[in-house]
Amino acid sequence: MEVIIVPNAQEGSDVAARLVARQVREKPDSVLGLATGGTPCKLYQLLARMHRSDHLDFSRVTTFNLDEYLGLDPAHPASYHRYMEENFFSQVNIARGHIHIPDGLAGDVAAHCVAYERMIRDAGGIDLQILGLGSDGHLGFNEPGSSLASRTRIKTLTERTRCDNARFFTNPCDVPHHVITMGLGTIMESRMCLLLAFGSGKAQAVAASVEGPVTASVPGSLLQFHTRAKVILDAEAASLLARAAYYQWVYKNKPEWQTDL
Ligand code: PGA
């Protein structure tokens, strides 16, 4: 796990955008796993800007989103379909047929989840998965207690997550209880994971995920088992890390042979 600590969310998004852009330039038909929520907004803005001014080409890229609320119409202002359309897809030249987001209105949810897993496999697996972190440590919508081997399925949100996400809804009571999310097993099969966390509200979940024991009680901690996981944090999100100074030294003094960034 590589921990990258930068002063603020803007710089963290910048580092993440450079990594995603490098992935897409090196492999134009990359499969990207995408996240929603407040955290990756700036990252999508930067990628859209790179598309406009630096010819970053998404025409051969395939995407799979982590999750969607069950029962929300794609046109609902708080749906992740709408979020992705407004924040990213409408800003770049991605092929419509290459976009995949779990269908919150699926009639047969179980069959839809199986099909979603099959589509990821058929696309060759996810090359780079962008992740946010819940204040309760969730990855995707895999809440604490989720099986570490889980696949795409229905989950029930914790009240903490419903409260965290209430800001996206006109009426807080409207935050759905149920979601479809890629599983932790699905996420762990991505060839690279990029976790972003910004702000003091994430500090506890970050410390538990990066330096605590690996446990289903903190789904983010499972990334300790991933061979290519990068965690990009601002100073506030990193504030409870015991080894923050060490991670900062490592990042600033990367030897030339360590070409991964
Ligand atoms: P946020 O959510 O980016 O809105 O803080 C992160 C998450 O729930 O994964």
Image (cartoon, helix red, strand yellow):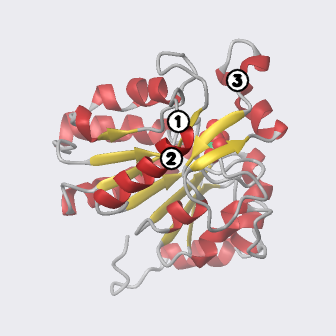
Question: What residue would you read off at disc 1?
Answer: 108
Would you say 110 lies left or right of 16 here? right
> Which quadrant: the C terminus?
bottom left
Crowding at dot 3, Cα within 10 Å, few <14 / some 14-19 / many 20+, comes out as few
State whether residue 35 appears in this view.
yes
Counting from the top left corner in percent of width and height, residue 53 is at 20, 36
Ligand 1 near label 1 (Cβ, under 8 Å)? no
Question: Mark 2 to mark 1: distance in Å?
Answer: 9 Å
Residue 173: x and y in percent read 79, 18
Q: Residue furthest right?
A: 159
Q: Quadrant of the N terminus?
A: bottom right
| Amino acid type of the residue that numbered disc 2 sits on in the rendered structure | Cys
Q: Is residue 44 above or below residue 151?
A: above
Where does the image place residue 237, in percent across and percent down from the top left?
Answer: 70, 54
Residues 177 and 17: in front is: 177
Q: Identify the residue at horizontal 67%, vertical 55% (top origin).
A: 235
Label 3 belongs to which residue? 167
Indicate the position of residue 140 as horizontal and vertical percent values: 60, 49
Measured Cα–Cα span from mark 2 to mark 3: 27 Å
Mark 2 or mark 3: which is in front? 2
User: Which residue matches tag 2?
Assistant: 113
Which quadrant of the figure shows ligand 1?
A: top right
Amino acid carrying label 1: it is Asp
| Mark linked to residue 147 | none
Q: Sequence-wise, which precedes: disc 2 or disc 3?
A: 2
